[in-house]
Image: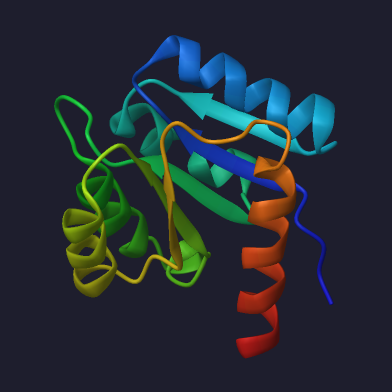
Amino acid sequence: MTELKRVLHVEDDEDIQEITKMALEVVGGMELDQYLEGSEALENIRKFKPDLILLDQMMPNMTGDEVLAHIRKIPEFANTPAVFMTAQSSEASSRLLETTDALEIISKPFNPMTLATQLSEIFKAASQNA
């Protein structure tokens, strides 16, 4: 079974990026590649080769589900597990899960001390179901 090591993170809020970086790199021991915009992530995803994609849903220029749709068109990332982070209502989050192939929604604000474990568990469950 594969261990979650590399996470691609797209988030337009620099403070949340910093908290996520601390949560995943320092607490979780993971390697993180972060971008403020989806277009930047799309340009660099092939170089980084993430195990999991972590996307903010509400971003200017391109929403998280739009970024994910573009990622899915890249053959080598068509099945890479994806998780959204959002401050949206639970109803909007449910619709997001129904309309994308994302595995989970993590609500903001999130707990930085448990984020790495939470993502690892999501990844582990996805690996077992693959």
Looking at the picture, how far across and down is residue 30, in whole percent? 78, 39
55 left or right, relative to 25: left
Q: Nearer the viewer, residue 104 or 42?
A: 104
* Residue at screen point 82% across, 25% down: 26
Give the number of marks.
Answer: 0
Against 70, is 15 above or below? above
Against 86, is 70 above or below? below
Q: In which quarter of the image is the N terminus?
A: bottom right
User: Is residue 95 visible to us here?
Assistant: yes
71 left or right, relative to 17: left
* Residue at screen point 61% across, 88% down: 129
Q: Nearer the viewer, residue 32 or 56?
A: 56
Looking at the picture, how far across and down is residue 119, in whole percent? 64, 54
User: Is residue 130 visible to us here?
Assistant: no
As drawn, the residue found furthest toward the bottom would be: 129
Q: Residue 118, located in which quarter of the rendered image?
A: bottom right
* Residue at screen point 28% across, 44% down: 64
Q: In which quarter of the image is the C terminus?
A: bottom right
28 left or right, relative to 23: right
* Residue at screen point 48% across, 20% down: 16
Q: Nearer the viewer, residue 25 or 88?
A: 88
Looking at the picture, how far across and down is residue 126, in whole percent? 61, 76
Q: Which of 37 and 45 is in front in this view?
A: 37
122 left or right, relative to 77: right
Looking at the picture, how far across and down is residue 83, in whole percent? 46, 55
Q: Residue 112, located in which quarter of the rendered image?
A: top right
Against 33, is 86 above or below? below
Against 24, is 78 above or below? below
As drawn, the residue found furthest toward the top would be: 15
In this picture the colour scheme is rainbow
